[in-house]
Amino acid sequence: MKILGILLLFAYSVRTFFAQAINIREYGDTILILDETRKWVSQGIKWQEFGAYSPFAQLFIMPFTFLSNPKACSILYAMNWVALLGTIFLFYSSLIPQIQKRWLLFATILLLNFWPLAYAMRAAKIEPVELFLIMLSLRAYQWEKKTLSAATLAAATLLKFLPGVLVLYFLVKKDWKWLARYSIFVGLITLVTCGWLGVDYHIDYFRSLSGGYIPWIFNQAPEAALQRLLYTSFPPVSNVYYPNPEVGFLFRPVLIALKIGLLCWVLRVLYKRECDIFVDCGLLLLCVPFLMKFYREYYIVLALPFFFAVIRDFLQKRSGVHQNRAGIFLLGLGFFLITFLGIFEVWFTRWTPQFFPAIENYHAIPYLSLPFWGFVFLVISWFRIYGRKTPEF
């Protein structure tokens, strides 16, 4: 009966992922970076609105600018699939043979039901490639190949800066040799991009990162979640940006203090309690949403190594994970809240205005903060599962 249930779940998962990541293609942002990179290559026009796309990301995209948008996006889409398969293989190879097949089954079911991953795949986002680079960096560190580990994490950081938070892990562990190699690779890649785009271009990019809070409907940063809770008037439906209310300004010092406190607490935990590298780095990646002013829900794809580690420890009965029902429940709840937004987004967008015509902009209501609360439960689940004592690895 259990086998039948798992097979039915697997079949449903394949159908869901096929519909979300294969049948539906949304290349909007990918086409944007292709077009902006073409402007620089052909006309020397700088990209004025960087967003999260770094100079190295543009260098990465440059070879595809000589193709048509459909061909370039198709290649990037295929590249994401290769990166995802590589990510699965790297973790699979770290497991003992007794659980490899079972881990692969449960990890596949998890991935097929993880809406942020489906969205990143169908939109040809850079996150699956970053995820592969993160996984390769962590595995290379386990193999004691520190040069490869530092090089791959440097590349991931410069593609989109979020993976750079993992440098804190090596700083806490006082691995100065790794940090030196990482700094060298960051410097070398930056020299290449400076030679191509110029120093001024990089200065403009870093200035854009230090900008203020972006009040966008899909922003999952603490500022955005607070704004949705306390917002009293809604702008027109067509406006995906909404003004930052004064209450956000009043709470900004408190939020900054909370972010600094969270970061210090996490670093203290990593310093005093040692799990394996996937679990420790998983905590850092889970905490990134709370440290940012802008964070999209699909960025959480980068924290998948933590999910993989939980499945591994559950199957191997490590650290009492298989008996920690509260921790597993919180993990599942966080996973559900993050995925819920994507599953019901179409239904909600189409039907809510008909049922609730008084709401002028349903995008601004707290419903869109569900992924943020999912991130909260994921962090709590980490401390519930791994925070009480040092696991035996």
Image (cartoon, rainbow, N blue to C red):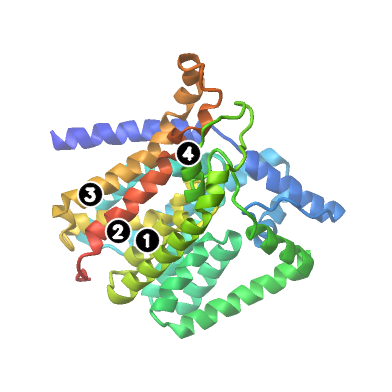
- At 70% from the left edge and 41% from the top edge, which residue is drawn? 69
Labels 2 & 4 near each other (Cβ < 8 A): no
As drawn, 258 above or below 104: below
Q: Residues within 10 Å of mark 2 (few under 14, many from 20)?
A: many
The residue under label 2 is 309
Q: Amino acid at mark 3?
A: Ile
The residue under label 1 is 282
Query: Could you say whether the residue bearing mark 1 is in a helix, strand or loop?
Result: helix
As drawn, 221 above or below 158: above
Tell me the quarter of the picture where residue 235 sits: top right
- At 78% from the left edge and 50% from the top edge, which residue is drawn? 38
Query: Could you say whether the residue bearing mark 3 is in a helix, strand or loop?
Result: helix
Q: Amino acid at mark 2?
A: Ala
CA separation in Å, label 2 and label 1? 9 Å
> 355 or 309: nearer the eye?
355
Along the polypeptide, which appears first: circle 2 or circle 4?
4
As drawn, 345 above or below 68: above
Mark carried by residue 328: 3
